[in-house]
Amino acid sequence: MISKVQTIISKWRASVYEQTQNAENLASCIRTLIGGATQTIFEPGCGTGKILFSLSQSGHETFGMDMDEHMLFYAAEKAALSPMRLINADILLAPWPKDFGCIVLASNLMHNLITDWEYKQAQKQLIMKSAGSLKKGGLLLLDFDCPILLSPLTKNKEICILSGTDQNGTKGQMYIKHTESDEKTRLLKTKVRYALTTKECETIAVSETFIKHVLTLEETTAWLYRAGFSIEALYGSHDFHPFDEKNRRCVIAARKE
């Protein structure tokens, strides 16, 4: 059962994310990779629908799925302005619609999964489900951070990744700190901390710890080949810099054979 505190946090996070995060550079990158033809596009983990909305306004037929109803609230507002079909469901457990021309696994979704699954298995599942939902010749676009080593991440100080006031008057910050890493298994332990104050001056201080598997390019491409994809393009940034030691935002365009 979802507690009152969890609901307050979820509403605040969705609202502040909607206010502060800009996805237009990523959406522009996706439009370039897709090309000029109109496509049916599916984004699992679509959040507030920022990417889908931009693609929909470009003429594409867009579908999104997310289990966070508070995120989808903002996506639904966008759907009233430009057609977007939205599904409230767990992307790992729910069946996906079929015969898409393009599927987008972006915004570091592969490293931001909320699941009880073994993390690496959950990542593989997204690639397999993508293969099952794309039509032959369809395009899978992946976008995630791909650091060479994890240990430098644990030396960073706690950083604030969200800050602001939501529509209900709750204000506060969301912080993250990477605390432990294992280079062999690529497992990264991360602490997430919320410090909120509601309009009624109720203070909420909550911390959560997550253990995630950070992908390498080698294992990702191996999973793609096994799922029946061929890789058409690889970049190290949304601005199409080459993937190298300096540019480690892994952007992959893979075609279903």
Image (cartoon, rainbow, N blue to C red):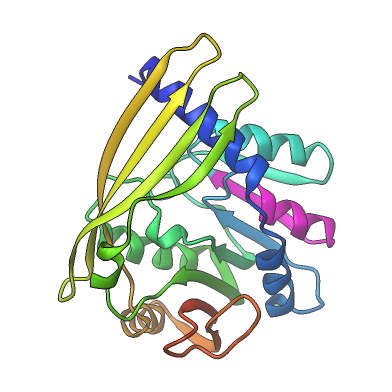
| Image position, residue 64 (x, y; %) | 61, 49
Residue at (58, 50) in percent of width and height: 46
Work out whether residue 71 can be spotted.
no
Which residue occupies the extreme top position in the image?
Answer: 200
Residue at (66, 51) in percent of width and height: 63
Segment colored magenta: 48-65
| Image position, residue 158 (x, y; %) | 34, 51
* Residue 60 lies in the magenta-colored region: yes
Above or below for 158 versus 17 = below
| Image position, residue 246 (x, y; %) | 46, 86
* Residue 50 lies in the magenta-colored region: yes
Work out whether residue 228 can be spotted.
yes
| Image position, residue 211 (x, y; %) | 23, 53
Residue at (38, 60) in percent of width and height: 111
From the image, which quarter does the N terminus lie in?
Answer: top left
Residue at (48, 77) in percent of width and height: 250
Q: Quadrant of residue 73?
A: top right
